[in-house]
Image (tube, coloured by chain):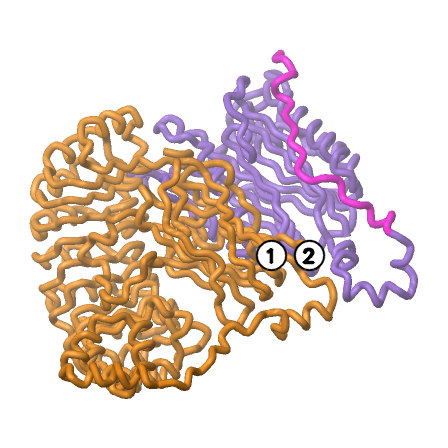
Amino acid sequence: MSNFECFAESVLDYTARYNHNMTISYGPENLTGKPVKYPDYGDCVDTYMLRKYGRWWIDSENSQKHYMTQDVEEIPSQDYVTLRFEATVIPTAVVIYETYNPGSVVRIWGRHTGEQWIILWEGKPEICPQTSRYFSPPIRQISDLINEIRLDLNHSLLTYQTALDAVLLAGKQPTSELQRKLLSSRLLTVQMDKYIKNESNCEGNLIDNVFTILPYDVIVHIFKYLDIKTLCRCAQVSKLWLSATLDPRIYSHLSLKRYWHKVDNRLLEMFMERCRALRKLDLSWCGNDNKISEEVFTRFLENSCKYLTHLSLCHSKFVTNTSLKNITHCCKDLTEIRLHDCNLDLYASSIHDDELIYILQNTPYLQHINLDMCSNLKRLDNITEIVSQCNRNLVTWSSWKIERMTAIGVRNLAKCNRLRELDLGWCFISSDPEDCLEHIAQGCKDLRRLILSRWRGVCDHLLLPIIRSCKQLTQLDLLGVYISGDICDIALVSLPKLQLLDISFCDAVKPEQVAVFKEYYPHVAIYHSLEFGV
Amino acid sequence: MVSLTYRLLPILIFKEKANPSLCPRFVDSQKKRKFSAADPNIQRKSEPQLVSAVCGFSKEKKIHRLVKGQFGDDAWFSVKHKTADVLGVADGVGGWRAYGINPGEFSLNLMRTCERLVRLGCFAPTNPSDLLAKSYYELLFHKKRILGSSTACVVVLNRENSRLYTANIGDSGFMVVRNGRVIHKSEEQQHYFNTPFQLSLPPPGYQADVLSDQPDSAITDNFPVEDGDVILVATDGVFDNLPQNLLINELLKVQGERCASRLQTVANSIAWMARNLSFDETFISPFAESAFANGINTIGGKPDDITVLLATVTI
């Protein structure tokens, strides 16, 4: 065996990125190759940056509440990125070079292309000092060859956006063909999972006897509180329990995101028998590597999802336009659809606008719309017009990084009076927002969260109406907007509920001013991130 | 005259390449066929590539902070990818200083983004103007507002077919010299005298008043190169101050040169000559000649930032 080290060669998959996939700035591509920034610390374009941090996204009304509260992981993964390495090794170390707000890596998985994922390390997110970090956690010793690494990230403890520069995989490589064969046929691995079947079932009978006294409905009710793993174990206890675990009443809410690595067609078919009246379904992250076929998913929809109210298919590769159409056909009661970051091909087709409009028209109770980075949506004016006509109950609108957004579009949105969260970050990086902020100020007085990152041509007097009329504002993101320190001061004084103010990269606001703000308004989290550290 | 010491800041980019002629003899023997397919190292030696050196000066007499890839408002990059070797220079338009904008920022970020795009393989070796366009587009996605404008010139050696693909916007440029003869030279693009074509990101409200050329207005060209050809990529600080015959004399010295340090010496001397002449008030520089042709009576060099990227082709 020889030692071998290599940096990531390519990025296979990811759930989050800062920019849309037409650009490489802050993109996951920057994870490949040698570290370019480390050991420097700062907010740089040539690293992989994530947008979300801290509790702000979890607190948002737009955030997805877990569909199965009994099945929440202790350390939830919020995002992941999968990398491929040039060489296939038995891993001895994985090093992550973090160059801005480190501490978000919670799990490291490894596998050989096409095989099962093996967990290498798991740990809680950490609060780290504000320096770059060479993160090399002790990984589990395995005897499998791997060439892919998946990092699970949890940004709940971060104080600001995190940046990863590079990932190094170190390990041992078989030197001879014999070694390689031995390893690939897994002769060296101890067969752990050959459990012994216990023949005595007297205890089972005992349990059965006890539980026959309990009304069946009570057992089902108790089972409702169990997570899927425990349910599976329970199903093996006795026939009575098995039949109880098959009861459709247990499965009104189903979230399989946590078990992404196990979910495939077979599993979905198994659930299809059990789920008759699903209300909430979360299949995020599932079905990559063609593990779920569209046909099975469509059958699942028809069979189990007639009364669905919440559907989350974030980053599920099997979703296409046809299945989207099926969703709108089958599920008339939907109040929440999450396709965020999901299947980028979805929007690459020619009917994307119409498709979206169709959904919008058919779901009058829609409250949350998230279209972040759907760069192929073209007729934004049209879409926003439909929204202002058909979806007046809208509470959140998010169209982060949609450059085709126009002032007309924003004015349309301003007609949705119940809007509480409005994310229009990076929508006007080259076009002119005109007077649309004034319309927002007049139309959406209940606004809590407003994101105007990198709007071009926003200056103090355009922002004033917002500050004057939206007194409920708790979060205001003005990253890269050309405003002065004075308007920040006015915002801090006149918005009593303000909790977050992001004025990173606002060149006209001096660091000294920010220091003063931080001192006078300790209850507000003020971010003033710069290219070279905070 | 100003002192020498703090201005001569040559930066060596590439280590000396192994001379193919020194390769072990087995290449000639029958083993060649066997190895050339299997061993990537041998394959690589036969591939065309550039040996390059860079030198330059800021027009400021005092240098505050030396940033890699930058000489004053000029910026450059030089990067290798498995399919191509890419060189580029950009000259930030100094007029932005009056608006409180650092002119070097736009050019530096433009070049750095080009470099990153090449390193990540997000480019086509046959389309350098697309590389410029992509890089320009990326600037919009920086969190930091990057404003200003810049001329740019990108030269790509496509390893596959040993052709040079070039794109040029404005008055920076390139020159390819073979045995003292100019094979190719970029054309200047000017709106009017001393106002070159430029890529720009003006501050909001200034769009109407600013000259802004789209990346697709770049003049593109492609032509085959041969072993030993000398490529000079430089900003107008060089072409405006050094007469072509002087330039060719220097370039002749490195015809077929494979040693990066000897290349560096010549790059230094070109930059140094341009620098000296730019401050010479009595010298009839190419800039003065062109001014005269435009009815402006002036004499002397044109003090400007100077960037010299010098490369030779080895095949």
> Mark 2 and mark 1 in contact (Cβ < 8 Å)?
yes
- Residue type marked 1: Pro
- Residue type marked 2: Arg
Label 1: element kind: loop
The residues colored magenta run B1-23
For label 2, the residue is B159
Of the image marks 1 and 2, the number of the one nearer the N terminus: 1
Q: Badge 1 local density, few (<14 within 10 Å), some, or many (20+)?
A: many
Residue at (31% x, 38% y) in the render: A504
Q: Depth check: A218 or B219 in front?
A: A218
Percent across and percent down for residue A324 are 28, 77
Against A70, residue A2 (above or below) is above
For label 1, the residue is B125
Is disc 2 on the same chain as disc 1? yes
Q: Name the side, left or right, on which A498 lies relative to A157.
A: left
Quarter of the image holding residue A267? bottom left
The number of numbered discs placed on residues in the rendered structure image is: 2
Quarter of the image holding residue A205? bottom left
Question: Chain A drawn in what color?
Answer: orange
Q: Name the side, left or right, on which A153 lies relative to A254.
A: right
Label 2: element kind: loop
Asked whether residue A98 is in view, the answer is: yes
Against A137, residue B160 (above or below) is below
**What quarter of the picture does the N terminus of chain B occupy?**
top right
Q: Depth check: A16 or B256 in front?
A: A16
Q: CA distance from mark 1 to mark 2?
A: 9 Å
Examine the structure image and report whether residue B92 is included in the region drawn in magenta.
no
Percent across and percent down for residue A138 are 51, 51
Q: Depth check: B63 or A156 in front?
A: A156
Chain the render paints purple: B
Percent across and percent down for residue A318 are 38, 76
